[in-house]
Image: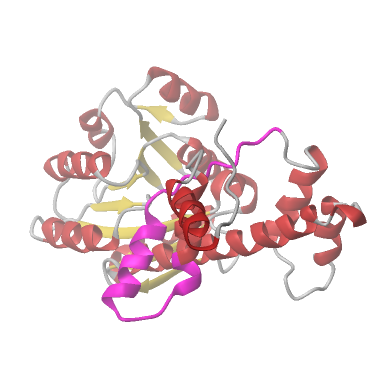
């Protein structure tokens, strides 16, 4: 198939390369000349603008959007809406908020343009392993683009999970679960590291746990690699960002009256990681001194 592709970041460029490897033709556009050249080196056609990209596609056109959620997606989708025609398809493979995707689908439907929201998981390993695709939108558009999904995903690694918004909703919950899994592994390994008397080999334990234990996973495989390279993580600062999906998942739990304490606390722990010194901890220390005479450490 012939498809337009907008956004050539860490995942986008690898997705283009995988599509080309599956004998699809890609017409790419990115803001920087460096990204455009990188795509050309992989065998993609490079367009000078969104309008140029759309003009090179054959109706019904399909354009895959892989840019950061929020303003970048909104602006690019709106511009593409003015360039695409009836029966064309716009795909958003980024991490957009699912309510924005529902609104976007309704807006494009009025113009006769189909919209698919595709939650995409696979990270930097997707080129070799394939991408898990959680797809929301019209069945007709899904069926038409199925050859694209088959190329991008591993076997059984894609599915139309529901109507517009469902793809990004499922990906949002996926990422909320990811937050909790990461936090559980983090706390477990911190306990192992703290038990100095045993001098535990964290890489070896990661490998061991992956041999039939109930907590074996790809994350543990990655942990083994991490600890082999830096056994005590001395080269890494314990500062953890969040990219939005965790916050949206917690907000959805509140909206639906669904208790999600583990995911919620894993998000709050990320906030804590960004504090060089916790003012709240200072308050607790000061109050313990006041009511119980407990010693406090003086700041340097």
Q: What residue do we see at 11% from left, 41% from top?
A: 82
How many badges with numbers are in the image?
0
Image quarter of residue 25: top left
The reply to whether residue 77 is visible in this rendering is yes
Q: Which residues are magenta?
A: 235-264
Q: What residue do we see at 71% from left, 62% from top?
A: 188
Q: Residue furthest right?
A: 198
Instruction: Say if 141 sits above or below 93 in the image.
Output: below
Instruction: Say if 16 sits above or below 100 in the image.
Output: above
Q: How is the image coloured?
A: secondary structure
Q: Position of residue 6 (x, y in %)?
A: 34, 37
In the figure, is residue 85 to the left or right of 148?
left
Q: Viewer-proximal residue, 20 or 183?
A: 183
- Is residue 10 within the magenta segment? no
Q: What residue do we see at 48% from left, 62% from top?
A: 291
Q: Viewer-proximal residue, 158 or 25?
A: 158
Q: Residue furthest top?
A: 33
In the figure, is residue 146 to the left or right of 216?
left
Image quarter of residue 249: bottom left
Q: What residue do we see at 21% from left, 45% from top?
A: 74
In the figure, is residue 145 to the left or right of 87?
right
Image quadrant containing the C terminus: top right
Image quarter of residue 134: bottom left
Q: Position of residue 68 (x, y in %)?
A: 34, 42
Q: Position of residue 178 (x, y in %)?
A: 53, 62
- Is residue 255 within the magenta segment? yes
Q: Viewer-proximal residue, 122 or 127?
A: 122
The reply to whether residue 145 is visible in this rendering is no
Q: Position of residue 46 (x, y in %)?
A: 38, 26
Q: Residue furthest left?
A: 110
Instruction: Say if 36 sits above or below 19 in the image.
Output: above
Q: Viewer-proximal residue, 59 or 187?
A: 187
């Amino acid at each position: 198939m012939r498809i337009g592709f907008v956004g050539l970041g860490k995942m986008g460029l690898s997705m283009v390369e995988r599509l080309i490897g599956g004998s699809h033709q890609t017409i790419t556009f990115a803001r920087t000349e460096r990204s455009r050249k990188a795509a050309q080196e992989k065998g993609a056609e490079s367009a000078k603008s969104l309008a140029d990209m759309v003009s090179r596609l054959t109706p019904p056109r399909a354009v895959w959007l892989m840019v950061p959620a929020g303003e970048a997606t909104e602006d690019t989708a709106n511009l593409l809406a003015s360039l695409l025609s009836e029966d064309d398809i716009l795909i958003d493979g980024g991490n957009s908020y699912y309510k924005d995707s529902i609104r976007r689908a309704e807006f494009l439907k009025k113009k006769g343009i189909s919209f698919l929201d595709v939650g995409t998981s696979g990270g930097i390993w997707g080129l070799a392993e394939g991408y898990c695709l959680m797809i929301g939108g019209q069945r007709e558009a899904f069926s038409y683009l199925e050859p694209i999904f088959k190329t991008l995903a591993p076997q059984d690694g894609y599915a139309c999970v529901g109507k517009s918004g469902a793809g990004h909703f499922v990906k949002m919950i996926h990422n909320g679960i990811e937050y909790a899994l990461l936090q559980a592994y983090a706390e477990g390994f911190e306990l192992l590291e703290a038990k100095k008397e045993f001098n535990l080999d964290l890489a070896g334990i990661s490998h061991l746990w992956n041999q039939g234990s109930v907590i074996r996973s790809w994350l543990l495989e990655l942990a083994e690699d991490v600890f082999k390279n830096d056994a005590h993580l001395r080269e890494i600062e314990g500062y953890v960002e969040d990219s939005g999906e965790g916050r949206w998942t917690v907000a959805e739990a509140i909206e639906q009256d669904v208790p999600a304490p583990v995911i919620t606390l894993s998000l709050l722990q990320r906030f804590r990681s960004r504090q060089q010194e916790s003012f709240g901890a200072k308050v607790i220390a000061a109050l313990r001194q006041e009511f119980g005479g407990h010693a406090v450490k003086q700041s340097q």
